[in-house]
Image (tube, rainbow, N blue to C red):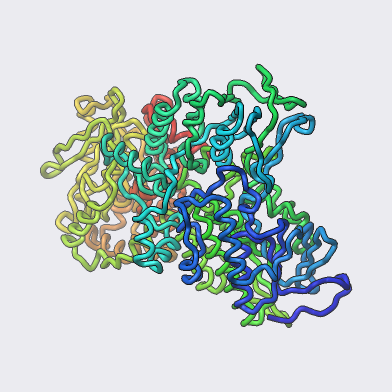
Amino acid sequence: MPELKSSSENRPAATEIFDVVVVGAGFSGLYLLHRLRNAGFSSVVLEEADDVGGTWYWNRYPGARCDIQSIDYSYTFDPELEKAWKWSEKYATQPEILRYLGFVADRYDLRRDIRFARKVLAAKWDEGEECWLLTTDKGATVSCRYYIMAAGNLSTPKPPEIEGVKDFTGEIHFTGRWPHHEVKFAGKRVAVIGTGSSGIQVIPKIAEQAAHLTVFQRTPNFALPAHNGPMPADRLAMLEGDRAGYRQQARWSLAGVPYPQQTLVSWQLTDAERRARFEKAWELGDLIYWGTQLWADQVGDVDGNGLVSELIREKIAGIVNDPETATALMPHDHPFGAKRPCLETNYYATFNRPNVTLVDLRQEALTSITASGLVTDKRMFDVDAIVFATGFDAITGALLAVHPIAGRGGKSLSEVWAHGPQTYLGSAVAGFPNLFMITGPCSPAALSNVVVSIEQHVDWVIDRMVAAREAGFSTIEATETAQKAWARHVADCSMLTLHRLANTWYTGANVPGKPQGIMMYAGGVGAYRGICDEVVSRGMLGFRLTGPNGAVQCNDGEIVRLQPDVRLVLNALADMNLPPFESMGAEGARGFLTEFNKGRPPGRPVGEVIDGTLPGTDGSLRYRLYRPASPGPHPIVVYFHGGGWVLGDEKSDDPFCRDMCRRSDMIFISVGYRHAPEHRFPVAAEDGYAATRWIAEHATELGGNAGAVLVAGWSAGGNIAAVTCQLARDRGGPQIAGQFLLCPAVDCIFDRPSYVDNATGYFLTRSPMHWFWDLYCSPADRHDPRASPLRGELAGLPPACVVTCEFDPLRDEGVAYAEALAAASVPVEQIQARGHFHGSFTMVDVVITGVGSRVQMAEALRRFAGVSMRAGRDGLAPHRAAVAAE
């Protein structure tokens, strides 16, 4: 890398000069120092504490343990290190983790480049010198080319929020800043405030000593038994049988521990099967197992999650003897996992002790602290000691504790983050050259086995610095475009989970006055690693690099534009290396589709499913009727499946029809129309019209409302639905109350921008669309409105909801149809789905980010039918709440 200048007008004479300065000597800082040395950078670590350890140096409270199994909560960069250290327990205690980090520091002789008891007070970017100037509490100034923050996500304790703390004359302790000497509680009256992770660990230990313990709880948390003990033999066998493979699986896993994600959903399991899975998890005591192995819909679906939550509440009721106390300990205000679940040892059983009292602050507010104790709005508690287990100013607290961090133009990081953190990849910030964060905001760290995330972050950052040095660049800086796009992607990923439904340190809601927002990447450790690799392979996309003599490299852009689950689906499809539909022939493609659909998650239960036949224009047509569980009669939606007029049947969009039936509380009747090439245009259109007319005439006997029906369809089915509306208008009925067109094929033109931009790579591509059209309709007939309804007369049609997807060849013709309807004075609603592809919304429970739009679709159908949304199914409310939270 270019040499730092030896002197400057802006640099004090006593300034120390390094290539890199790291703040923090925990897991991140130690590995950074090791890698920096090997990469040939002169470097120093500045650490506020007196020794290594980071959060494990400060958090010494009784009962402090990790909640990730010890063999996973370990460095993996050196196989010899792994062999040299043996953990004594399944979940290591704080003293053992601290000894481990000391062992690592000694093994690699790291302490000689760590300045202990040294706190950074401010950092400023020197534009002329292209370096950072750091001010410390020792008065010294340090200059560095790169400044790396490795202070950790949970290292800045949250200050007390209760009036009168300074008046208390007894002992006060904070779990996050525990004394280094033994604290004795024997014979004392002790109050613990907070029942988060540290509270749940410390409360049983204090209860064993104290004359009386009073626990003040504002919000109960889900706590799961740790069942700590010796290292589990099965996990050890997996690790030792293939150590390299085990670690590699962890690096590409969801949470940094090699568990495959469960694919079975809750409604595929009987109650007995769900309980058996739950009991196994309860006995295993493994946090990652809980998050990945019960059923697939527990993480992102309110209903699936509720099953887990209720089973945990049953356990609490069975452990805690006093029903009132048990009820107070049961979380009801957030889904399981929306806050980080805690691992416990005798926590719930502790409340059966005669010397323990629980105070539910939801029933009586804690108003103040006096010289002798605590006061609620109902009573007083005299105590000898208070333990604050009130958590941390998480994710951003340690970063903003250095103030100011001033980047280009003197703008401070706290100013830039006034409304919440903004980063690119969780590691860099636009306007702050050569500043990197390890496991920073909007990275997966807090939702993962953090050691795996730390190693990935450190390796990526150091490798980028080495590459920049070799290429002659002196600065690396994120672009605004990339940073804004990353924020959108992080927000999209949050919709895969239920974190948005809880007030938690995940979002900053635990700190009064802190901007609340999405601070973590929920897309998974492996997905994040793949994105970081892609940034590099695409020429450092989203970064601006500069060097001497005006050298600049800037490949600006957005690294992820697809929704996160859509990206995974498309990657999985690409990995399957499927032959193109058009290469299979019609029969081959139909057989493939049948087999493909067998592997998808099943649709959710509805009130009733009936298969039948109805008379078409030339023989009978099959249909499948989906009836809601609520009492009827219901409005009827006539639905036409997708498949390019060539593929599919009345069952092929089964999960989607079930989902829309439940969300709209309407009968869906999926019609199996006849297919090309055996039955070419206009057979499908005429079948659709004939089926709709028959269903309208027999609505009452089908259990529906008499009168108008609605029509709906996806892709080619959207074409048939649109054509049916025009034919019904022109042929005197039936009356249609509304049309719902999902990614419809409504025109025969192939040169719109969406056909060009999405010609390849998004499953439905330009080539099969040509094939579908050629099989269905001759070029001479394609301008007929029954083939291309965009070319028909649109005035007088029923109101419409048109859904289009960003990465779909059919996008622009769908938008054009909606605009043409509006121009013809037809009421029309458009849902333009950012980041989705042609199959997004029919992949129910695979593409979770489609839920919000499907709720909008259901609402549109009910408006068309003149039915209030509040009259829908009982289970609709949670989904509406989830969407409102978006």
Q: Position of residue 363 (x, y in %)?
A: 58, 21
Residue at the far front in the pictured view: 187
- Dividing the picture into quadrants, the one containing residue 105 is bottom right
Can see residue 53?
yes
Instruction: Identify the residue at image location x=73%, y=52%.
Output: 401
Q: Position of residue 464 (x, y in %)?
A: 59, 73
Residue at the far left in the pictured view: 619
Q: Is residue 36 above or below residue 729?
A: below
Q: Position of residue 419 (x, y in %)?
A: 68, 47
- Closer to the camera in the image, 494 or 587: 494
Q: Is residue 450 above or below residue 45?
A: above
Q: Position of residue 371 (x, y in %)?
A: 77, 26
Q: Is residue 60 above or below residue 669?
A: below
Report the side of 587 relative to 391 (left or right): left
Q: Is residue 884 above or below residue 868?
A: below
- Dividing the picture into quadrants, the one containing residue 735 is top left
- Closer to the camera in the image, 65 or 19: 65
Report the side of 36 relative to 595 (left or right): right
Instruction: Identify the residue at image location x=40%, y=69%.
Output: 244
Q: Where the N terminus falls, by quadrant? A: bottom right
Instruction: Identify the residue at image location x=26%, y=58%.
Output: 781
Report the side of 108 relative to 87 (left or right): right
- Closer to the camera in the image, 61 or 831: 61
Instruction: Identify the residue at image location x=45%, y=41%.
Output: 829
Count how many numbered circles sit on residues in the image.
0
Can see residue 411?
no
